[in-house]
Amino acid sequence: MTSLPSEDLSRLLATLHQTRSGDDLQELNFLNQVLTSKGMTNLLRVHKKISAIVGKPHSASDTNGTLEYEPEMIVPIVSNVFNISCEVIETLQSFVQRSGSRDSRELILLLQRPAFQSLLLVHDTISQKDYVPKLPEPPFNTVDEDEETIKIVQLVKSNEPLAQTAEPIVGATIKTDERTGKIVIARVMHGGAADRSGLIHPGDEVVEVNGIDVLGKTPNDVLEILQNAEGTITFKLIPSESQRPSRENRVRVRALFDFTAALDRYIPCKEAGLDFRRGDIIHIVSQDDPYWWQARHEGDKQMRAGLIPSRMLQEKRIAYERAHSANNNSDQPEIGCSPARSIGSLKSERSSPTQKVMYALAENEDFDRQEIVTYEEVARLMPYPAVPRPIVLIGPPGVGRNELKRRLIALDPDKFRTTIPYTSRLPKPGEADGVDYHFLDRQQMERDIDDGLFVEFGEYKGNLYGTANRSIKEIIELGYTCILNPHHQALKTLRTAEFKPHVVYIKPPGFNVLRETRSAAYARSTFDENSSRGFTDDELAEMIRSGQRIELHYGHLFDDVIVNGDLSTAFEQLLTVTRKLDTQSQWVPVSWVV
Ligand SMILES: Nc1ncnc2c1ncn2[C@@H]1O[C@H](COP(=O)(O)OP(=O)(O)OP(=O)(O)O)[C@@H](O)[C@H]1O
C-alpha cells in the first residue's frame, strides 16, 4: 500500500476494508483488485505528473474546501508534434532517396519507433487537453465571418448553486478591466465548463452574453444575465493577445459515400453543408449533434466547418431507403447520394454468361448489399520499409491486372513479388512443387480452407485453387512488396490490420479506347482459355459492365484508381503509387495503426 501514489486512494481502500460485508463482498473484492492493480497505480502516477505540469493547485482551499487550479503554467508551443514528425519523416525519406544518407535513414528509423511515436501522440493528447470532456462547437448562424477577431463560445450552464461570481455557472470569473473599463474574463477554473471548452481564456473581452451587449455593464449586471439564462449560454468574446490554440477533435474518417448538401432535403441549413465524394478524408470537428456532425475536408485549416450527416443518420436513412425500395420497389425520396439506391437496382441485373469463372467463389454479393457503409475512421500510417504493404490490384476479368503485375515484377524482381498458388490437382509434367504451384492433397486443402488459412479459393474443373495467407505473410516478412490480383470478393479477407493492403482499382477505359488499345496490342481474350483470339465486342462491353458492378460494391475500399487505357501510362501510374507508398504516410483504418 505504501507504493500507492495517492493518499486519497489509500483512504478509499481503508474505507473499503471497513465496509466489507455480506452480499457486496464480491463487488468489493473486485473494486479492491482494480484499485490496487499495477495499472491503476501507474495511471495515478501519470495523472499526478500531468496535474503537476498543466495546473498547480493553490496551497489554500476555497471556501467549499475544494482545491482551485491556476491557469496552465506551461503552454505547449505546438500541439501537433505527431503530424510534424510525419512530415519530417517524409522530407527525410525523399532526401534519403536523393542522397542515400545513412544518418538520415537512421533518424527515420528512430522517429518511426512505436515508442517514440506513442510519446509524440501522448504529448499532443495532453497539449490539446483531449482527455477532458468536449463541449459543443459554436453554432453556425452566430459565427461572424467578417470579424475574425471575435469568437463565439457556447457553454452549458452548470447545475451547481449560484453564487456571487460567475464561477459556478460556467467555470470562469469576470471583472472590469481597470484600463479599458470593459468586462473581461478574470480567471478560468481548471476543469470547469469554460476550461473544458478550451475556447475561453483570461483576458478575453466579453462583448455579448446571450445576445445582450455588455458594454457599460458591471460584472454584477453580467452575473444577473447569467443567472437568468437557461440551458446553454452563448458568449461573444474578443480573444486576448496571448490566446492558446484551441483544442480540436482528432477524428478523421474516410467518406464511403457521396454527399451533396444541396440535394439533401433534411439538412437543417443547406448553405452550412459540406459536400464530399466517396474516398475523401474528412476531419470531424464535432459529433455533439447526434444527426449532423460538423466537419472539414482534411487539410482545409482555414475553412469553416460544415454539416455532414452523422453515421447514425446515414445508417438510418440507408436502412429506410432499402426497406422502402424492397416494399414498393418505387422511386425513392431524394436524400443524398447513398450507394444503397443503386445497389438495390442491381438486384435485377443479370450477370453475363460470358464471364470467365476461374475462381468459382460462392457468390455472396447479397451479403455486400446488406452492408451499410458510411464512414471509416482512419489514421495516418507511416511507410515502414522493413515491412512493405502489399499492393492489391482489383478489376474486372481481362482488364490487365496480370499484365501490370507481370511488368512490375519484371522491372524490379528484388522489390516486387507475388504469391505461388496452392492447388489440389496433381502436378503436370515439368511442374515443380513450390515453383508453379504448391501441391496439396484435397482433404488437407479443404481443412485449411475451413480453418480460414486462405484469403481466396475456388474450384475449377474439379480441382481446388487458392492463395494462402501464409504465402502473403512470407513475402512481407522477407521485405518484398507483395503484388496480388485476387478476385474482388477476397478484399473482405485481405483488408485487415495483418496485411494492411493498398488497394488499386484497375478500371477499364471507355468502350472505344478499350477496343482500340486491345486490338492495337493484339491483346488475348481471357474469357476463353481454349483459344488465343482477341476480345470480342461483347466481352469488352462485359468488362466495362463488370467493372461498374465492382466499383459500386467495392469502390469504398479502393485507395487508388488507375484507368488502363494506354498500357505504358497505366504502368507509370502504378509505379507512382508504389513510390508513394515507400515515401509518404497514407490514411488507413484506424485499427491498423497501433
Ligand atoms: N492497356 C492495355 N492495352 C493493350 N492490351 C492490354 C492492356 N492491358 C492488358 N492488355 C492485354 O490484355 C490481355 C488480358 O490482360 P490480363 O491477362 O492482364 O488481364 P487480367 O485482368 O489479368 O484478366 P483475368 O483476371 O481474367 O486473368 C493481355 O493480352 C494483356 O497483354
Image (cartoon, grey):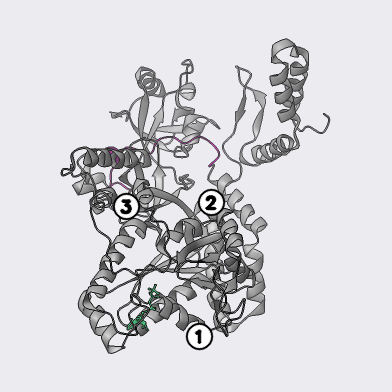
Quick one: which residue is furthest to the left in this view? Answer: 331
Q: In which quarter of the image is ligand 1?
A: bottom left
What residue sits right under mark 1 in the picture? 410
* Numbered disc in front, either 3 or 1: 1
x and y percentages locating residue 559 in the rendered image: 41, 64
Q: Name the residue under label 2.
A: 591
In the rendered structure, the answer to whether residue 214 lies left or right of residue 27 reads left
Q: In this view, does 320 lie to the left or right of 333?
A: right
Q: Name which residue lies at 61% across and 40% down.
A: 54
Residue drawn at the location 44% of the way across and 39% of the way down: 199
Look at the image and tell me whether residue 240 can be seen. yes
Quadrant (top left/top right/bottom left/bottom right) for the N terminus? top right
Mark 3: amino acid: Phe
Residue 135 drawn in magenta:
yes
Magenta stretch bounds: 130-150
Q: Which residue position is annotated with label 3?
A: 257
Amino acid at the residue labelled 1: Ala
Alpha carbon of mark 3 to alpha carbon of mark 2: how far? 21 Å
- Residue 139 rendering spot, x and y as whole percentages: 32, 37
